[in-house]
Amino acid sequence: MRGADRPWWQIPDFDSGVGDIKVVWELSRMDWALAWAQRARQGDAASLARLNDWLTDWCRNNPPYLGPNWKCGQECSIRVMHLAMVALILGQAGRPAPALRELVHLHLRRIAPTLHYAVGQDNNHGTSEAAALFIGGSWLQAQGVPSASRWARLGRRWLEERTARLISEDGSFSQHSLNYHRVLLDTCSMAEIWRRHLDLPNFSERLQARVRAAADWLRHLINQTNGDGPNLGANDGAHLLPLTETPYRDYRPCVQLATVLFAGQRACPESGPWDDALRWLGLPLPHESVAPPGSIQADAGGYVILRRGPLMVLLRYPRFQFRPSHADALHLDFWHDGDNLLRDAGSYGYNAGAQYLRYFSGAASHNTIQFDGRDQMPRLGRFLFGDWLATSKLEPLTDHAGELYVAAGYRDSLGGNHCRSIRLSDTALIVSDEVSGFVNKATLRWRLAPGQWTLDGTGITDGTQSLVVQASMPIVRCELVEGWESRFYLNKSAVPVLEVEVNQPGVLISHYRLAA
C-alpha cells in the first residue's frame, strides 16, 4: 500500500495516493473482528484462529504511526471500541492478552494528542475519540497501567462535554445526517456498555438525557416496516456495531440498543434480529416499550415529522447552529409503509470528483426549490457552505380535522425567498411553494421512486399514484429527467426526477395522490 512507510501527519487528506482513503480506512475499522468473535463464541475454533491471524497481519502491515491507517484519530478510536466489544463477546475483557493491551495502548497514544482537533470539528470525531479514550483508558487502568487513568478521565470529561454541546434537548445532532446520527448513538452505547462492564460511576444525568433524546429522534425518523429512513445528509458508509444480520440501512438495532441502555425500554416492541446486539453483549431485554412513533417537531435541528397511518413526511428547515454539509433547506421526504416515494439523493463519495460533490450535496439533489441554477448557500470548500440560511417564517405543526399542517420559509443572501407549506391527510400530500426574489428562474424538483412514470401535462403517474403540479404563474418547463441517488457509499443509481420551472414569482402547488 502506497504511503505505508510515511508518518501519518505527512499524508495529505485527499491526495493520499490510495484513491478514496475511506475505502482503506473501512477495512481497518476491524468490524471483521466482531464477526470472527461471534463465530468463535459459538464454538468455531477456526474463526478464533483467523481473528488472531488477521490482527497479527494488520499489526505487521501497519507499524505504529506510519501509513494512512494511523492518519485519523477517529479511525483509531473505532478500532479501540471494536476491540473492546470483541473482548466482551469472547469473555476476555478481564484478562486481555499482552499483545492486545499493547495494541490498545498504542492507539490511545495516537488519539490523545489530537483530541482537541477532533473536538474542534463539532461532529462525531470528538465523541468517537472521547469514547475510545474512556473505554481504552479504563481498560488499561483495570489491567494495572496507572498512567492510563488520565486517558479514562479525559475521555469521560470530553464525552460529557461533547454530548451536551452537540445534542440538542430535542435529540437533534450537530451533523444533519441519519447515518452519522447512528454513529453517535452506537458510540455512546459502546461507552455505556463498557462503563457497566467495569462497574464505573454512572455518566451524568445530562448525558443520559441527551443520548436518550437522540435515540428517540432517530426512532421517529425511521419506519417500523424495514427500519429504513430518509437518505438525509452526509454518509460515509459507517456502521460501527454490526452485530446483527439486518441490512445496512436498517436502523432498528441501533435504536433498540440505545433505548434499552439509556431509557430502560424497548424501542421495537416486537422481538426480532434488532435484539441480537443485546444478546451478544449480555444485556437483558426490558418488557416495557416506549410509545409508538408519531408526529414531532424537533425545532432545534429544523426537523418536522408528519405521520398519518402508514404515511410519513420529513420536512427540513434551516436551524444551523453547526455547519451544514448539504444545501437541503425545505427538502421533503415522503414515505408510505416503508417505501420512499419522494427521496433524497444521499452523498455518494467524498473523493469522487468535484462534479459529484457539487451535485449530491447541492440543491439539485433534494426535493426543494433551486433559484437560478445555484445552491441555496455559497460553497466555500469541500464540506463547507457560507451565508448559512436562517428560517424567516415558521408555522408550527398542527393537527386539525384529520389533516396535519406545517409551514416554513427562508430568504437567502441573494434575495431568494421560498416558503413551503405541507398538508398531509390519509390519502394525499399537498405541498405549496411560494417563491420570489430570483432573477431568471426557479426550479422545483421531485425526486421519485424508480418506476414506470409517464408525463401528462404538468403531472406524472405510474398507473397507481400520481403527482400533479399547478401554479399561479406560467410554467415554462415541466420535464421528467434522470437524476442520481446514492443509498450506499460509492454506489449510485439513476432515479426519475420531475422538474418544474417558472420564471415569475408566485405559488406552485403539488398534489401527490396514492391509490385508493
Image: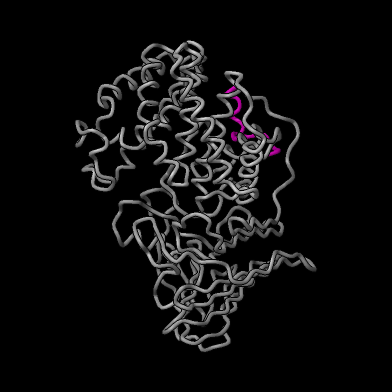
Q: Is residue 204 above or below residue 499?
A: above
Looking at the picture, how far across and down is residue 208, in whole percent?
64, 36
Task: Write the residue at 25% across / 25% down.
Answer: 61
Instruction: Name the one closer to the observer, 54 or 498.
Output: 54
Looking at the picture, how far across and down is residue 500, in whole percent?
48, 78
Tell me the quarter of the picture where residue 119 sits: top left
Task: Write the residue at 53% across / 32% down.
Answer: 157
Tell me the quarter of the picture where residue 422 sits: bottom right
Task: Write the residue at 61% across / 56% down.
Answer: 300
Quadrant of the snapshot with the N terminus: top left
Instruction: Name the one closer to the observer, 67 or 477.
Output: 67
Image label count = 0
One can see residue 442 in this view:
yes
Q: Is residue 215 magenta?
A: no
Q: Is residue 85 above or below residue 241?
A: above
Looking at the picture, how far across and down is residue 79, in whole percent?
41, 29
> What segment is highlighted magenta in the picture?
268-282
Residue most extreme to the right: 401
Looking at the picture, how far across and down is residue 30, in whole percent?
39, 29
Q: Is residue 280 magenta?
A: yes
Quadrant of the snapshot with the C terminus: bottom right
Q: Is residue 388 left or right of residue 213?
A: left
One can see residue 35 in this view:
no
Colouring method of the image: one colour
